[in-house]
Image: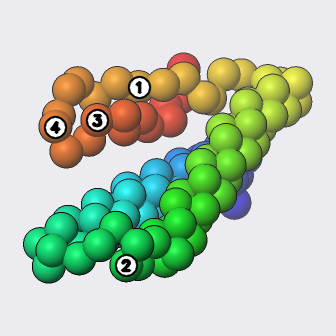
Amino acid sequence: MIKTEVIASVAGDLNSTEHAVDAAIARATTLVQSMIGGRAALNLSPVVGAEAQQKAMEAIASLSAARQAMVACHAEMAKDHRRLGYGVYAGIEEKGPRPSAIGEHRLRAV
């Protein structure tokens, strides 16, 4: 592999990981919403499922910490990339507003 292929591969893996963490956060928040909605639809006390809901919210907090760590990883990799003299390869390329991709960013070569 040549340098640009290696760099593009690592950048792609980073991007995929960031999107996977975001997707996990979205799914976990959907789960909590479903738990609350299900309880309400069954006319159950808020006490029912409270522990499970708390565990799901703890998972969301952990996923949020993982997301912050990935953002920090991205920043450090960008610094290393520039420090090694490979130029800038970390700009955020906006694809325009699409409802299904709010917050979606892609790495691009500059």
Q: Classify residue 80 as left or right of residue 43.
A: right
Residue linked to disc 2: 48
CB atoms of marks 1 and 3 within 8 Å = no
CB atoms of marks 4 and 3 within 8 Å = yes
Distance between the alpha carbons at the discs numbered 4 and 1: 17 Å
CB atoms of marks 3 and 2 within 8 Å = no
Q: Which mark is residue 93?
A: 1
Residue linked to disc 3: 102
Distance between the alpha carbons at the discs numbered 1 and 3: 13 Å
Distance between the alpha carbons at the discs numbered 3 and 2: 34 Å
CB atoms of marks 2 and 4 within 8 Å = no
Q: Count neighbours of disc 1 (C-alpha within 10 A) and say few if under 14, some if 14 to 19, many if 20 or more.
A: few
| Secondary structure of the residue carrying numbered label 1 | strand
Where 64 falls versus 41 (above or below)? above
Residue linked to disc 4: 99
| Secondary structure of the residue carrying numbered label 3 | loop
